[in-house]
Amino acid sequence: MGGLRKLGSVAIEVVWQLGFIARFFWLILVYSGQSFTRLNLTIRELYFSGVLSLLIILVSGLFVGLVLGLQGYEILQRYGSSDSMGTMVALSLLRELGPVVAGLLFASRAGSAVTAEIGLMKVTEQLKAMDMMAVSPIARVVAPRFWGGVISMPLLAAMFSTMGIFGGWLIGVVFIGIDDGAFWSQMQAAVDFRYDVLNGVIKSCAFGVAVSLIAVFQGYDCVPTAEGVSRAITRTVVSSALAILALDFVMTSFMFRGL
Amino acid sequence: MSRTTLDLWVGIFVAMGIAALLFLALKVGSISGSEIRSPYTLTAHFDNIGGLKARAPVKSSGVLVGRVEQIRYDNERFQAEVVFTVDGRYKFPVDTFANILTSGLLGEQYLGLEPGGEEKTLAPGETIKKTQSAVVLEKLISQFMFDKAAEGEPAPAK
């Protein structure tokens, strides 16, 4: 009996939370008109979540590409097909690694910062003060941060993939000595714009929405204490990572069925 | 930070992102060259399609001219029906030969078109009559073995 009651309360809690997130998301969409008419608010957030994430995204993209190059060559040369290294590097980056790793990095670099900022605003009662002055905190604080994340995420993922392909090219062509023409032509023959590139961009847009929504929600929803803010930041990173990986599986199973 | 430097950095960021997307679209995905323009569909029946898949390339003289759209089983003819699109710029004679070929030893399978000599060209939606199935390795080997065995037998007494 006690167990059942516990299950029921957990279920109600989960449903309540989901409903709260959905309503919050709806409010962001309703108020997001203001974040585009007052564009300087959104540009500021683009700077903080996009431009400041550039360095980590570019450097990790390069290293992922370098590793893919080395590992790919090691495996492909067993089958005597090291020429198709470009294909392997490009496809794995465009379809999976680019959006997913860039999303994970973005969640821990920019998502956590957004949560901390909004959470601290809540602790110092800035959000309440805004409400008192008839300024909607969702329109002034939350929506610009949300859109800053949504816009910068696909751009960052594309840069990550580009750097990764450059890294693979560096290892394959410059260090190992695969033919430059074979590297690019095999890649171009195998990569389809609509099937591979566009699906990757769609993935990164979805991850951008998920990470930004989780980040602003956790900040807005946090318990207004020092401990509450730290917990909210942890939750942002953990649940963003889980959301990215789960969404990635679902989207991959719809997009790439090999049919 | 002043407004102008902020704008400048965000501008650089967005320009870099768009440049990366363009690089992926043009240099990696080659959107321009291989895109099929104003396609029309043709159909061909095969006894055996081997490992041909939807979206496999259709080539003539090694040049990409189209893509396989759909593969289904025709229960009346007991054959595989392959529907594929061909670039509208290219017209093929009605006696074109359709083969299922393999690029390289372990490469992917593709549909090869060998034009015949007829004046009339295939209209959209028409069916290619002359086809050759994919080579199945087991059949090839068993044929070779039987031929060898037949060679080794003493000539039947007359």
Image (cartoon, coloured by chain):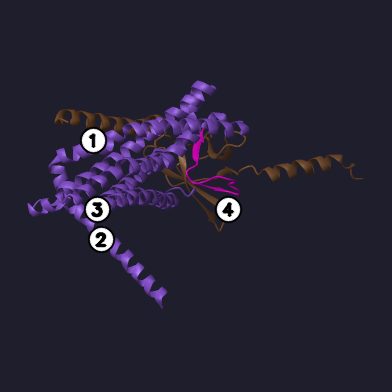
Chain colours: A purple, B brown
Q: Residue at x 16, y 45 (%)?
A: A35
Separation of residues labelled 1 and 2 (CA atoms):
29 Å
Relative placement, left or right, of A140 versus B53 is left
Disc 2 marks a residue whose amino acid type is Phe
Chain part drawn in magenta: B43-65
In the rendered image, is residue B62 in sight? Answer: no
In the rendered image, is residue A239 in sight? Answer: yes
Q: Are marks 2 and 3 on the same chain?
A: yes
Judging by the rendered image, the residue that carries numbered circle 1 is: A47
Residue A223 within the magenta-colored segment of the rendering: no
Whether residue B66 is situated above or below residue A26 in the rendered picture: above
Disc 3 marks a residue whose amino acid type is Thr
Judging by the rendered image, the residue that carries numbered circle 2 is: A20
Separation of residues labelled 3 and 1 (CA atoms):
28 Å
Separation of residues labelled 2 and 3 (CA atoms):
21 Å
Disc 4 marks a residue whose amino acid type is Gln
Q: Callout 4: helix, strand or loop?
A: strand
Q: Residue at x 36, y 72 (%)?
A: A8
Residue extending farthest to the right is B157
Judging by the rendered image, the residue that carries numbered circle 3 is: A225
Judging by the rendered image, the residue that carries numbered circle 4 is: B79
Circles 3 and 1, Cβ within 8 Å, touching? The answer is no
Q: Are marks 1 and 2 on the same chain?
A: yes
Q: Residues within 10 Å of mark 2 (few under 14, many from 20)?
A: some
Q: On the image, which quarter does residue B152 sit in?
A: top right
* Front residue of this view, candidates A65 and B96: A65
